[in-house]
Image (cartoon, rainbow, N blue to C red):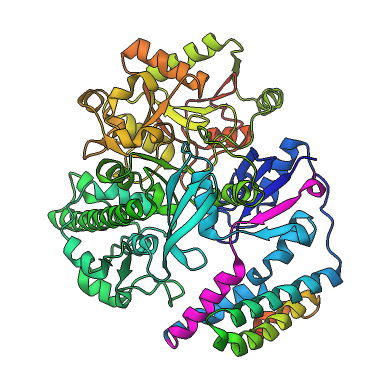
Amino acid sequence: MSSEPPKPSRLESILMRLGTAGALLAMLGRGSRPWMLPLVLVLLVIGAGMVFLQSVQYVAPFIYMVF
Amino acid sequence: MPQVTLGVSALYHDAAAALMIDGQVIAAAQEERFSRLKHDPSLPVRAAQWCLDEAGLSAQDIDQLIFYEKPLRKFERILSTSIATFPRSALSFPRQMKAWLGDKLWTRNRLVEAFGVRPERVGFSDHHRSHAASAFYSGPFERAAVLVADGVGEWATTSLWRGGPAGLEPLGEVRWPHSLGLLYSAMTAFLGFAVNEGEYKVMGMAAWGTPRYREALDRVGRLLPDGGFALDLDHFSHHWHPTRAYTDRLVALLGPPRPPGAPFALLDPSASAAARAESQRHADLAASVQSWLEDALLHVIRHAHQRSGEANLCLAGGVALNAVANHRLALEGPFAQLFVQPAAGDAGGALGAAQWASFGVAGRPWSPSRFRPDLGPSLDEGRVADLVADLGFPCEALPHEDALLDRAAQDLLSGQVLGWVQGRAELGPRALGHRSILADPRGPDTALRVNTRVKLREPFRPFAPSIAEEQAALVQLPPAAAALGPYMTVACPASDRLREAAPAVVHVNGSTRPQLVSAADDPRYHGLLRRMGEATGLSALLNTSFNLKGEPLVGSATDALATLARCELDAVYIGPLRVGRPPARVLGG
């Protein structure tokens, strides 16, 4: 780690996020709180929007106006 | 091929990294020691880099990176609590969602990007499992019950485990929002101190009071017959309010909260009677919550003893840093021996995550041993000498051990307050003779001198002593706390001799929080204590952490020199060098 660590590609990053979202939904579906699934789906869409907006150079400064 | 495991704790407070190779702890350090931000929660990139450098490895060599908790479980808890407490949670919900959806939920991405490991090599432990592993796999017992008590992990706030050759087996837990740690933290905030920082201050203040609010607190926190406990949630708001941990009902029950920074009038002879009465009320509140916590912990461990069937107990989690409670657990509890992980807070979670992966998952053989918390960065003595010379600090090289110790003892005996930076830095909040400020504990004004010249901390808080092991009779450590001697994790009664000879390290109620130092564990520090004993008959020193108020412990020699330049320490011993106060031009005078 003395040099800059290798960064994952954009595709890898997206796949990891999708994996996290899938794991969250699966956890809720399996557990005692399936009623939270619709809320979590909506929140994940919002979250994906936040992540996307933060990653777009010219939109990021305005993210605090959106949320 | 050796198996390289990196444990990581972060994103709440006290971020840390711990590196293990083939089941051996190689290095562990807190990010705050590198970033110089106290309780730094950010991903411990610098700490991890130092750990890898120490082992001569790179990120590509990491076989598994284990994060100390499960973010998805935590998110589930936050969401369901927000829904259950709506509309009261309306204020905290947007803040929480912003933090989680924009950042914390994607912890796997962040770990991969920050540490440069492949995604498939990233794993997640549980918060309490990490704590439990840090206590059991660092402890001296083949088998033990393990109790974890803190604010909250994913869902658990208190959990019981059984540790043995087969690993760690969960036996039961108390779940959020009922929490010993959060009740104590709520009272910490009530008493005007910062949460996650001021809990020690409440413990210190408690000795000045009597627990006359105990009955009121018994109504707020009830002990249950099954060995658990329940909070009356009408009095607390930690589960729905973004910043305040208690409600107006607690204020109605206990009276007005203490304003932050309010003076402690019990030590001020010129204070008015009204001010003294108010400070006494605050001390009584502190004594009441301390008494409640001790009784609750005793209740929990009595049940733990029955449930686990084990003779010994390991403790971890932030609540386990309550040294006064640990004394009662040792004295009145049913266990034959206790061990408290010295890094019981979240920093120790990094170590526990790595230990769980190495021993619990990979099934590596493990054997109990004497835990050494000096797992952090050591000193490059050649570079230190160059640095001191470049900065123009007066410096005396003392390459011979006897000369070094004689000179340090002479300084201390002449009343000087010294920095003592030796060997590898400690993991956790306690300075145990590696990054310490030392003073001769004799004389009534020692504590005042250390406080006013260096530490600037609240006058009601006591200092702790380091004592050479052969003078262990200076303190009355209960037999069940024998394994806690080296770590300053238990407060116990001081002997009459210590009370008379060294008032600076004895609290107002006659208790003290000792570190017993053996020649085998730390020959240099023990040698210094021995010299103090030869000169005074008392092989003891006042030992407090080497930092200024609001700063983390010093890590490197540079930090030590910067601290020396900004306070009134007389000198710092860095390895074999005695570094004196810098001339005025270095100080900018």
Q: Looking at this view, name the residue that lies furthest to the left.
A: B273
Residue B98 drawn at (x, y percent): 61, 77
Q: Residue at x 20, y 48 (%)?
A: B266
Residue B61 drawn at (x, y percent): 80, 46
Rendering quarter of residue B452:
top left
Seen in the image, is B41 located left or right of residue B241? right
Residue B469 drawn at (x, y percent): 39, 22
**Up-down relation of residue B354 to residue B396 (above or below):** below
Most foreground residue, B409 or B358: B358
Residue B430 drawn at (x, y percent): 46, 39
Give yes or no for residue B75 being in the magenta stretch. Answer: yes
**Up-down relation of residue B136 to residue B511 (above or below):** below
Q: In the image, which residues are magenta?
A: B58-87
Q: Residue at x 36, y 14 (%)?
A: B533
**Up-down relation of residue B297 to residue B178 (above or below):** above
Question: In which quadrant of the rendered image does the C terminus of chain B lie?
Answer: top right
Give yes or no for residue B91 being in the magenta stretch. Answer: no
